[in-house]
Amino acid sequence: MTIREEWLKKDGSSFPGKTYVECLLKPVFNDQRDYLFHAMFQVHRAHVLMLCEKEILPAEDAKKILQAVETIACCDYQQLEYDPRYEDLFFMMEARLTEEIGKELAGNMHIARSRNDMGVAMYRIVLRDRLLDLIDKVLTLREILLKVSSEHLETVMPAYTHTQPAQPTTLGHYLMAVHDVLERDSRRLLSAFQNVNQSPLGAAAITTTGFDICRDQVKESLGFTSMVENSYDAIAGADYLLETATVIIVLMTNLGRWIQDFLLFCTREFAAVRIADPYVQISSIMPQKRNPVSVEHSRSLASSAIADAQAVCTMIHNTPFGDIVDTEDDLQPHLYQSIDKCVRVLNLMSAVISTIEVNRNHLLQRAREGYITITELADAMVREKGISFRTAHQIASRVAKTAIQEGKELDDISPGMIDRVARDVIGYDLAFTAEELKRVCDPFTFIEIRKCPGGPSPVEARRMLDEREKRIRENRQDWQDIQRKLEAARTDLNRRVQELIEGR
Protein backbone atom coordinates (compact mmCIF):
# COMPACT_ATOMS: atom_id res chain seq x y z
CA MET A 1 0.00 0.00 0.00
CA THR A 2 1.38 3.41 -0.97
CA ILE A 3 1.62 6.27 1.51
CA ARG A 4 -1.19 7.99 -0.39
CA GLU A 5 -3.40 4.94 -0.02
CA GLU A 6 -2.54 4.67 3.68
CA TRP A 7 -3.49 8.28 4.33
CA LEU A 8 -6.74 8.03 2.36
CA LYS A 9 -7.64 4.82 4.16
CA LYS A 10 -7.18 6.58 7.50
CA ASP A 11 -8.77 9.93 6.53
CA GLY A 12 -11.44 8.80 4.09
CA SER A 13 -11.86 9.56 0.42
CA SER A 14 -14.24 12.52 0.63
CA PHE A 15 -14.39 15.88 2.35
CA PRO A 16 -13.95 16.41 5.21
CA GLY A 17 -11.02 14.11 5.89
CA LYS A 18 -10.39 13.00 9.48
CA THR A 19 -7.20 15.09 9.78
CA TYR A 20 -8.99 18.18 8.45
CA VAL A 21 -11.79 17.63 10.96
CA GLU A 22 -9.49 17.18 13.95
CA CYS A 23 -7.05 19.98 13.06
CA LEU A 24 -9.50 22.57 11.79
CA LEU A 25 -13.23 21.98 11.65
CA LYS A 26 -13.69 20.74 15.20
CA PRO A 27 -11.58 23.49 16.87
CA VAL A 28 -13.26 26.16 14.71
CA PHE A 29 -16.70 24.79 15.58
CA ASN A 30 -15.89 24.90 19.29
CA ASP A 31 -14.69 28.51 19.02
CA GLN A 32 -17.80 29.53 17.09
CA ARG A 33 -20.01 27.81 19.68
CA ASP A 34 -18.24 29.44 22.62
CA TYR A 35 -17.97 32.96 21.21
CA LEU A 36 -20.49 33.55 18.41
CA PHE A 37 -23.68 31.65 19.24
CA HIS A 38 -25.69 34.52 20.74
CA ALA A 39 -24.45 37.05 18.18
CA MET A 40 -25.59 34.73 15.39
CA PHE A 41 -29.15 34.68 16.66
CA GLN A 42 -29.21 38.45 17.18
CA VAL A 43 -28.31 38.84 13.51
CA HIS A 44 -31.05 36.34 12.54
CA ARG A 45 -33.65 38.34 14.47
CA ALA A 46 -32.69 41.71 12.98
CA HIS A 47 -32.46 40.41 9.43
CA VAL A 48 -35.78 38.57 9.45
CA LEU A 49 -37.58 41.56 10.94
CA MET A 50 -36.16 43.78 8.21
CA LEU A 51 -37.20 41.32 5.46
CA CYS A 52 -40.70 41.30 6.90
CA GLU A 53 -41.02 45.06 7.24
CA LYS A 54 -39.72 45.53 3.69
CA GLU A 55 -42.36 42.96 2.58
CA ILE A 56 -39.69 40.67 1.14
CA LEU A 57 -40.94 37.99 3.54
CA PRO A 58 -44.65 37.59 4.29
CA ALA A 59 -45.45 38.31 7.94
CA GLU A 60 -46.69 34.76 8.52
CA ASP A 61 -43.44 33.31 7.17
CA ALA A 62 -41.37 35.72 9.28
CA LYS A 63 -43.40 34.71 12.34
CA LYS A 64 -42.68 31.01 11.81
CA ILE A 65 -39.00 31.65 11.20
CA LEU A 66 -38.66 33.78 14.33
CA GLN A 67 -40.51 31.21 16.44
CA ALA A 68 -37.97 28.62 15.34
CA VAL A 69 -35.12 31.06 15.92
CA GLU A 70 -36.28 31.67 19.49
CA THR A 71 -36.69 27.96 20.17
CA ILE A 72 -33.20 27.07 18.99
CA ALA A 73 -31.63 30.14 20.63
CA CYS A 74 -32.77 28.79 24.02
CA CYS A 75 -30.88 25.51 23.67
CA ASP A 76 -27.88 24.75 25.89
CA TYR A 77 -25.34 25.74 23.27
CA GLN A 78 -22.40 24.63 25.45
CA GLN A 79 -23.56 21.04 24.88
CA LEU A 80 -23.28 21.35 21.09
CA GLU A 81 -20.57 19.19 19.58
CA TYR A 82 -19.06 19.07 16.13
CA ASP A 83 -20.98 16.92 13.68
CA PRO A 84 -19.21 15.97 10.42
CA ARG A 85 -22.49 16.40 8.54
CA TYR A 86 -22.12 20.16 8.93
CA GLU A 87 -19.14 22.27 8.01
CA ASP A 88 -19.56 24.62 10.97
CA LEU A 89 -21.96 26.05 13.55
CA PHE A 90 -23.72 28.17 10.91
CA PHE A 91 -24.78 25.15 8.85
CA MET A 92 -25.65 23.12 11.95
CA MET A 93 -28.05 25.84 13.09
CA GLU A 94 -29.51 26.11 9.60
CA ALA A 95 -30.17 22.35 9.71
CA ARG A 96 -31.87 22.75 13.10
CA LEU A 97 -34.07 25.49 11.65
CA THR A 98 -34.87 23.27 8.66
CA GLU A 99 -36.02 20.54 11.04
CA GLU A 100 -38.30 23.05 12.78
CA ILE A 101 -39.87 24.86 9.84
CA GLY A 102 -38.85 23.10 6.64
CA LYS A 103 -36.31 23.75 3.93
CA GLU A 104 -38.14 26.56 2.14
CA LEU A 105 -38.70 28.80 5.13
CA ALA A 106 -35.28 28.11 6.59
CA GLY A 107 -33.71 28.97 3.27
CA ASN A 108 -35.73 32.18 2.85
CA MET A 109 -34.29 33.48 6.12
CA HIS A 110 -31.06 34.04 4.17
CA ILE A 111 -32.55 36.16 1.40
CA ALA A 112 -30.26 39.16 0.69
CA ARG A 113 -27.63 37.86 3.09
CA SER A 114 -24.38 35.95 2.86
CA ARG A 115 -22.19 34.13 5.33
CA ASN A 116 -19.70 36.90 4.54
CA ASP A 117 -21.59 39.91 5.90
CA MET A 118 -23.22 37.80 8.59
CA GLY A 119 -19.85 36.50 9.78
CA VAL A 120 -18.29 39.95 9.98
CA ALA A 121 -21.35 41.26 11.84
CA MET A 122 -21.08 38.48 14.41
CA TYR A 123 -17.37 39.18 14.91
CA ARG A 124 -18.05 42.87 15.41
CA ILE A 125 -20.87 42.26 17.90
CA VAL A 126 -18.72 39.97 20.04
CA LEU A 127 -15.68 42.20 19.78
CA ARG A 128 -17.51 45.39 20.73
CA ASP A 129 -18.84 43.76 23.91
CA ARG A 130 -15.36 42.61 24.87
CA LEU A 131 -13.93 46.04 24.15
CA LEU A 132 -16.54 47.63 26.39
CA ASP A 133 -15.61 45.22 29.17
CA LEU A 134 -11.95 46.09 28.67
CA ILE A 135 -12.71 49.83 28.72
CA ASP A 136 -14.61 49.32 31.98
CA LYS A 137 -11.59 47.66 33.59
CA VAL A 138 -9.26 50.41 32.37
CA LEU A 139 -11.61 53.03 33.83
CA THR A 140 -11.65 51.17 37.15
CA LEU A 141 -7.86 51.07 37.34
CA ARG A 142 -7.72 54.77 36.43
CA GLU A 143 -10.17 55.58 39.24
CA ILE A 144 -8.04 53.61 41.68
CA LEU A 145 -4.83 55.28 40.54
CA LEU A 146 -6.34 58.73 41.08
CA LYS A 147 -7.67 57.76 44.49
CA VAL A 148 -4.29 56.47 45.63
CA SER A 149 -2.56 59.47 44.03
CA SER A 150 -4.72 61.79 46.12
CA GLU A 151 -3.40 60.09 49.26
CA HIS A 152 0.24 60.58 48.26
CA LEU A 153 0.57 64.12 46.90
CA GLU A 154 3.13 64.78 49.65
CA THR A 155 4.74 61.34 49.79
CA VAL A 156 8.27 62.23 48.70
CA MET A 157 10.23 59.72 46.62
CA PRO A 158 13.08 59.72 44.11
CA ALA A 159 12.23 59.95 40.42
CA TYR A 160 14.48 57.87 38.19
CA THR A 161 16.08 58.38 34.81
CA HIS A 162 18.38 55.77 33.25
CA THR A 163 17.42 53.61 36.28
CA GLN A 164 19.33 56.04 38.55
CA PRO A 165 17.92 58.40 41.23
CA ALA A 166 17.44 61.71 39.42
CA GLN A 167 15.28 64.24 41.31
CA PRO A 168 12.73 64.23 44.13
CA THR A 169 9.07 63.88 43.23
CA THR A 170 6.02 62.43 44.97
CA LEU A 171 4.33 59.06 44.68
CA GLY A 172 1.15 60.93 43.75
CA HIS A 173 2.97 62.61 40.86
CA TYR A 174 4.30 59.24 39.69
CA LEU A 175 0.92 57.47 39.90
CA MET A 176 -0.76 60.36 38.09
CA ALA A 177 1.72 59.91 35.25
CA VAL A 178 0.75 56.23 35.09
CA HIS A 179 -2.89 57.30 35.02
CA ASP A 180 -2.32 59.77 32.20
CA VAL A 181 -0.83 57.08 29.96
CA LEU A 182 -3.80 54.87 30.81
CA GLU A 183 -6.16 57.74 29.99
CA ARG A 184 -4.70 57.89 26.49
CA ASP A 185 -5.13 54.12 26.28
CA SER A 186 -8.81 54.70 27.13
CA ARG A 187 -9.15 57.06 24.20
CA ARG A 188 -7.46 54.58 21.89
CA LEU A 189 -9.78 51.81 23.08
CA LEU A 190 -12.85 54.00 22.58
CA SER A 191 -11.70 54.85 19.05
CA ALA A 192 -11.26 51.13 18.34
CA PHE A 193 -14.74 50.46 19.74
CA GLN A 194 -16.27 53.12 17.50
CA ASN A 195 -14.67 51.60 14.42
CA VAL A 196 -15.69 48.09 15.46
CA ASN A 197 -19.29 49.14 16.14
CA GLN A 198 -20.20 49.55 12.46
CA SER A 199 -22.60 47.32 10.59
CA PRO A 200 -21.47 45.36 7.51
CA LEU A 201 -24.88 43.77 7.03
CA GLY A 202 -26.43 44.28 3.63
CA ALA A 203 -23.10 43.90 1.89
CA ALA A 204 -24.07 40.25 1.33
CA ALA A 205 -21.22 38.40 -0.42
CA ILE A 206 -19.42 41.62 -1.41
CA THR A 207 -21.64 43.66 -3.81
CA THR A 208 -24.90 43.99 -1.81
CA THR A 209 -28.11 42.52 -3.27
CA GLY A 210 -30.83 43.12 -5.82
CA PHE A 211 -33.49 43.00 -3.11
CA ASP A 212 -34.85 46.28 -1.74
CA ILE A 213 -33.45 45.90 1.77
CA CYS A 214 -32.89 48.54 4.46
CA ARG A 215 -29.34 48.38 5.79
CA ASP A 216 -30.02 51.21 8.22
CA GLN A 217 -32.82 49.33 9.93
CA VAL A 218 -30.62 46.29 10.59
CA LYS A 219 -27.86 48.56 11.80
CA GLU A 220 -30.13 50.22 14.35
CA SER A 221 -31.72 46.94 15.44
CA LEU A 222 -28.30 45.60 16.39
CA GLY A 223 -27.11 48.76 18.13
CA PHE A 224 -24.44 49.64 15.58
CA THR A 225 -23.74 53.37 15.55
CA SER A 226 -22.89 53.53 11.85
CA MET A 227 -22.60 51.44 8.73
CA VAL A 228 -19.62 50.32 6.67
CA GLU A 229 -21.06 51.94 3.57
CA ASN A 230 -18.98 50.49 0.76
CA SER A 231 -19.99 46.84 0.52
CA TYR A 232 -16.54 45.76 -0.69
CA ASP A 233 -15.01 47.49 2.35
CA ALA A 234 -17.60 45.85 4.62
CA ILE A 235 -16.34 42.41 3.63
CA ALA A 236 -12.66 43.08 2.85
CA GLY A 237 -11.69 45.70 5.42
CA ALA A 238 -10.04 44.07 8.42
CA ASP A 239 -8.56 47.21 9.93
CA TYR A 240 -11.08 47.09 12.79
CA LEU A 241 -9.27 43.93 13.88
CA LEU A 242 -5.85 45.46 13.38
CA GLU A 243 -6.80 48.57 15.32
CA THR A 244 -8.09 46.53 18.24
CA ALA A 245 -4.94 44.38 18.23
CA THR A 246 -2.58 47.34 18.11
CA VAL A 247 -4.43 49.17 20.87
CA ILE A 248 -4.03 46.06 23.05
CA ILE A 249 -0.32 45.95 22.23
CA VAL A 250 0.07 49.60 23.26
CA LEU A 251 -2.05 49.13 26.41
CA MET A 252 -0.17 46.10 27.67
CA THR A 253 3.23 47.54 26.75
CA ASN A 254 2.39 50.64 28.77
CA LEU A 255 1.21 48.59 31.74
CA GLY A 256 4.20 46.30 31.57
CA ARG A 257 6.62 49.18 32.10
CA TRP A 258 5.20 50.33 35.44
CA ILE A 259 4.38 46.79 36.52
CA GLN A 260 8.12 46.20 36.26
CA ASP A 261 8.62 49.24 38.50
CA PHE A 262 6.30 47.74 41.10
CA LEU A 263 8.28 44.52 41.15
CA LEU A 264 11.30 46.65 41.98
CA PHE A 265 9.43 48.79 44.51
CA CYS A 266 8.38 45.76 46.55
CA THR A 267 11.83 44.14 46.74
CA ARG A 268 13.36 43.94 50.22
CA GLU A 269 16.28 46.07 49.04
CA PHE A 270 14.06 48.81 47.64
CA ALA A 271 11.35 48.47 50.32
CA ALA A 272 9.14 51.23 48.93
CA VAL A 273 5.81 49.39 49.03
CA ARG A 274 4.37 46.28 50.63
CA ILE A 275 1.95 44.16 48.63
CA ALA A 276 -1.08 43.09 50.69
CA ASP A 277 -1.15 39.52 51.96
CA PRO A 278 -3.92 38.26 49.63
CA TYR A 279 -1.66 38.96 46.66
CA VAL A 280 1.63 37.45 47.80
CA GLN A 281 2.65 33.84 48.12
CA ILE A 282 4.97 32.28 50.69
CA SER A 283 7.83 30.17 49.36
CA SER A 284 7.42 26.40 49.66
CA ILE A 285 10.80 26.11 51.37
CA MET A 286 11.79 29.62 52.50
CA PRO A 287 9.15 30.79 55.01
CA GLN A 288 10.50 34.34 55.26
CA LYS A 289 9.70 35.13 51.63
CA ARG A 290 6.73 37.15 50.41
CA ASN A 291 6.69 36.50 46.69
CA PRO A 292 4.69 39.19 44.79
CA VAL A 293 3.09 36.62 42.51
CA SER A 294 0.15 38.87 41.59
CA VAL A 295 2.51 41.41 40.07
CA GLU A 296 4.71 38.74 38.50
CA HIS A 297 1.75 37.05 36.82
CA SER A 298 0.44 40.44 35.67
CA ARG A 299 3.74 41.08 33.92
CA SER A 300 3.65 37.64 32.30
CA LEU A 301 0.00 37.92 31.24
CA ALA A 302 0.63 41.34 29.72
CA SER A 303 3.36 39.82 27.56
CA SER A 304 1.09 36.95 26.59
CA ALA A 305 -1.71 39.37 25.64
CA ILE A 306 0.72 41.23 23.40
CA ALA A 307 1.76 37.96 21.73
CA ASP A 308 -1.87 37.05 20.95
CA ALA A 309 -2.53 40.52 19.55
CA GLN A 310 0.60 40.36 17.42
CA ALA A 311 -0.63 37.02 16.07
CA VAL A 312 -3.74 38.83 14.79
CA CYS A 313 -1.64 41.39 12.92
CA THR A 314 0.59 38.68 11.48
CA MET A 315 -2.36 36.57 10.29
CA ILE A 316 -3.97 39.52 8.48
CA HIS A 317 -0.68 40.61 6.91
CA ASN A 318 -0.64 39.79 3.17
CA THR A 319 -4.17 38.36 3.33
CA PRO A 320 -5.90 39.24 0.03
CA PHE A 321 -8.25 42.23 0.08
CA GLY A 322 -11.49 40.31 0.01
CA ASP A 323 -13.48 37.87 2.12
CA ILE A 324 -11.24 36.58 4.92
CA VAL A 325 -13.87 34.77 7.01
CA ASP A 326 -11.84 31.55 6.89
CA THR A 327 -8.78 33.39 8.19
CA GLU A 328 -10.92 35.11 10.80
CA ASP A 329 -12.20 31.79 12.12
CA ASP A 330 -8.64 31.05 13.23
CA LEU A 331 -7.84 34.67 14.07
CA GLN A 332 -10.72 35.70 16.33
CA PRO A 333 -9.84 33.48 19.32
CA HIS A 334 -6.41 35.15 19.51
CA LEU A 335 -8.14 38.51 19.86
CA TYR A 336 -10.64 37.31 22.46
CA GLN A 337 -7.91 35.57 24.46
CA SER A 338 -5.77 38.69 24.28
CA ILE A 339 -8.59 40.83 25.66
CA ASP A 340 -9.33 38.25 28.37
CA LYS A 341 -5.69 38.40 29.50
CA CYS A 342 -5.80 42.20 29.49
CA VAL A 343 -8.84 42.07 31.77
CA ARG A 344 -7.04 39.71 34.15
CA VAL A 345 -4.01 42.01 34.31
CA LEU A 346 -6.17 45.07 34.94
CA ASN A 347 -8.16 43.30 37.66
CA LEU A 348 -5.02 42.06 39.38
CA MET A 349 -3.29 45.43 39.35
CA SER A 350 -6.46 47.17 40.51
CA ALA A 351 -6.45 44.90 43.57
CA VAL A 352 -2.72 45.42 44.17
CA ILE A 353 -2.75 49.21 43.83
CA SER A 354 -5.87 49.55 46.01
CA THR A 355 -4.24 47.71 48.90
CA ILE A 356 -0.53 48.61 48.86
CA GLU A 357 1.16 49.92 51.98
CA VAL A 358 3.68 52.69 51.24
CA ASN A 359 6.85 53.10 53.30
CA ARG A 360 6.73 56.90 53.34
CA ASN A 361 9.66 57.42 55.72
CA HIS A 362 11.92 55.11 53.75
CA LEU A 363 11.04 56.81 50.47
CA LEU A 364 11.74 60.21 52.03
CA GLN A 365 15.12 59.02 53.23
CA ARG A 366 15.94 57.76 49.75
CA ALA A 367 15.01 61.20 48.40
CA ARG A 368 17.60 62.73 50.75
CA GLU A 369 20.33 60.48 49.35
CA GLY A 370 22.23 60.40 46.10
CA TYR A 371 22.52 64.20 45.71
CA ILE A 372 19.22 64.28 43.83
CA THR A 373 18.36 67.83 44.92
CA ILE A 374 21.57 69.22 43.46
CA THR A 375 19.69 70.52 40.40
CA GLU A 376 18.06 72.98 42.78
CA LEU A 377 21.48 73.99 44.13
CA ALA A 378 22.52 74.88 40.58
CA ASP A 379 19.23 76.72 40.01
CA ALA A 380 19.72 78.68 43.25
CA MET A 381 23.18 79.81 42.10
CA VAL A 382 21.57 81.21 38.95
CA ARG A 383 18.55 82.80 40.68
CA GLU A 384 20.26 84.11 43.82
CA LYS A 385 23.93 84.52 42.92
CA GLY A 386 23.64 85.74 39.35
CA ILE A 387 25.93 83.26 37.57
CA SER A 388 25.18 81.44 34.32
CA PHE A 389 23.47 78.06 34.44
CA ARG A 390 26.31 76.22 32.71
CA THR A 391 28.79 77.60 35.24
CA ALA A 392 26.41 76.76 38.09
CA HIS A 393 26.08 73.23 36.71
CA GLN A 394 29.88 72.90 36.69
CA ILE A 395 30.14 74.05 40.32
CA ALA A 396 27.31 71.76 41.45
CA SER A 397 28.94 68.82 39.68
CA ARG A 398 32.23 69.41 41.47
CA VAL A 399 30.43 69.79 44.80
CA ALA A 400 28.80 66.37 44.29
CA LYS A 401 32.15 64.75 43.42
CA THR A 402 33.80 66.30 46.47
CA ALA A 403 30.95 65.14 48.73
CA ILE A 404 31.21 61.61 47.34
CA GLN A 405 34.96 61.56 48.00
CA GLU A 406 34.38 62.73 51.57
CA GLY A 407 31.52 60.27 52.17
CA LYS A 408 28.90 62.98 52.70
CA GLU A 409 25.33 63.40 51.51
CA LEU A 410 24.23 66.71 50.06
CA ASP A 411 22.59 67.90 53.29
CA ASP A 412 25.91 67.28 55.08
CA ILE A 413 27.93 69.75 53.01
CA SER A 414 28.89 73.15 54.39
CA PRO A 415 28.86 76.61 52.81
CA GLY A 416 32.66 76.45 53.05
CA MET A 417 32.84 73.43 50.73
CA ILE A 418 30.76 75.24 48.10
CA ASP A 419 32.95 78.33 48.42
CA ARG A 420 36.14 76.29 47.92
CA VAL A 421 34.74 74.79 44.72
CA ALA A 422 33.40 78.17 43.57
CA ARG A 423 36.80 79.83 44.02
CA ASP A 424 38.37 77.17 41.79
CA VAL A 425 35.74 77.71 39.08
CA ILE A 426 34.85 81.43 39.17
CA GLY A 427 37.43 82.88 41.53
CA TYR A 428 35.15 84.05 44.36
CA ASP A 429 32.88 82.76 47.13
CA LEU A 430 29.13 82.26 46.60
CA ALA A 431 28.48 82.88 50.29
CA PHE A 432 25.47 80.64 50.86
CA THR A 433 24.34 80.69 54.49
CA ALA A 434 23.76 77.40 56.30
CA GLU A 435 20.02 78.15 56.35
CA GLU A 436 19.95 78.83 52.59
CA LEU A 437 21.85 75.63 51.94
CA LYS A 438 19.53 73.58 54.11
CA ARG A 439 16.52 74.93 52.24
CA VAL A 440 18.08 74.31 48.83
CA CYS A 441 18.99 70.71 49.68
CA ASP A 442 15.59 69.82 51.19
CA PRO A 443 13.55 67.51 48.90
CA PHE A 444 10.31 69.08 50.23
CA THR A 445 11.49 72.49 49.04
CA PHE A 446 12.58 71.01 45.73
CA ILE A 447 9.08 69.66 45.14
CA GLU A 448 7.15 72.59 46.58
CA ILE A 449 8.66 75.23 44.31
CA ARG A 450 8.07 73.21 41.14
CA LYS A 451 4.67 74.74 40.52
CA CYS A 452 4.95 74.86 36.73
CA PRO A 453 2.05 73.18 34.94
CA GLY A 454 2.54 69.44 35.33
CA GLY A 455 5.04 69.70 38.17
CA PRO A 456 5.05 67.72 41.45
CA SER A 457 4.21 70.64 43.76
CA PRO A 458 1.25 69.51 45.89
CA VAL A 459 -0.68 72.61 44.84
CA GLU A 460 -0.17 71.91 41.13
CA ALA A 461 -0.67 68.18 41.60
CA ARG A 462 -4.01 68.84 43.32
CA ARG A 463 -5.11 70.99 40.38
CA MET A 464 -4.15 68.22 37.95
CA LEU A 465 -5.91 65.63 40.08
CA ASP A 466 -9.14 67.63 40.18
CA GLU A 467 -9.16 67.93 36.38
CA ARG A 468 -8.52 64.23 35.91
CA GLU A 469 -11.24 63.25 38.35
CA LYS A 470 -13.67 65.40 36.38
CA ARG A 471 -12.61 63.82 33.09
CA ILE A 472 -12.89 60.28 34.38
CA ARG A 473 -16.40 60.95 35.65
CA GLU A 474 -17.26 62.07 32.14
CA ASN A 475 -15.54 59.00 30.65
CA ARG A 476 -17.50 56.72 32.99
CA GLN A 477 -20.73 58.45 32.01
CA ASP A 478 -19.92 58.01 28.31
CA TRP A 479 -19.27 54.30 28.89
CA GLN A 480 -22.57 53.93 30.73
CA ASP A 481 -24.40 55.74 27.91
CA ILE A 482 -22.96 53.32 25.35
CA GLN A 483 -24.00 50.36 27.49
CA ARG A 484 -27.51 51.73 27.87
CA LYS A 485 -27.88 52.27 24.11
CA LEU A 486 -26.76 48.74 23.33
CA GLU A 487 -29.05 47.29 25.96
CA ALA A 488 -31.93 49.41 24.65
CA ALA A 489 -31.31 48.11 21.13
CA ARG A 490 -31.28 44.49 22.38
CA THR A 491 -34.46 45.02 24.37
CA ASP A 492 -36.24 46.72 21.48
CA LEU A 493 -35.20 44.01 19.02
CA ASN A 494 -36.48 41.26 21.32
CA ARG A 495 -39.71 43.17 21.91
CA ARG A 496 -40.37 43.53 18.18
CA VAL A 497 -39.65 39.86 17.63
CA GLN A 498 -42.16 38.87 20.34
CA GLU A 499 -44.77 41.26 18.97
CA LEU A 500 -44.49 39.67 15.52
CA ILE A 501 -44.59 36.14 16.94
CA GLU A 502 -47.64 36.95 19.11
CA GLY A 503 -49.39 38.87 16.33
CA ARG A 504 -49.51 42.13 18.25
Image (spheres, rainbow, N blue to C red):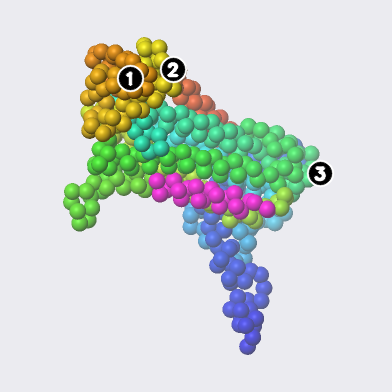
- In front: 189, or 181? 181
The residues tagged by marks 3 and 1 sit, at their Cα atoms, a distance apart of 92 Å
- Name the main secondary structure of what is drawn in magenta: helix
Rendered position, 487 above or below 77: above
Q: Is residue 84 visible?
A: yes
Which residues, given as a range, are shown in magenta? 299-319
The residues tagged by marks 3 and 2 sit, at their Cα atoms, a distance apart of 79 Å
Which amino acid type corresponds to the residue marked 3 in the rendered image? Gly
x and y percent of residue 96 in the render? 60, 56
- How many numbered discs sit on the rendered protein? 3
Image point 68% across, 53% down: which residue? 319
Q: Which marked residue is nearer to the observer: mark 3 or mark 2?
A: 2
Look at mark 1 in the image and give the residue it sits on.
423
x and y percent of residue 229 in the render? 73, 37
Q: Quadrant of residue 417?
A: top left
The answer to whether 54 appears left or right of 291 in the picture is right
- In front: 367, or 13? 367
Look at mark 2 in the image and give the residue it sits on.
388
Q: In which quarter of the image is residue 200?
A: top right
Look at mark 3 in the image and give the residue it sits on.
210
Which amino acid type corresponds to the residue marked 2 in the rendered image? Ser
User: Circle 1 sits in a helix, a strand or a loop, which is it?
Assistant: helix
User: Circle 3 sits in a helix, a strand or a loop, which is it?
Assistant: loop
The answer to whether 105 appears left or right of 259 in the picture is right
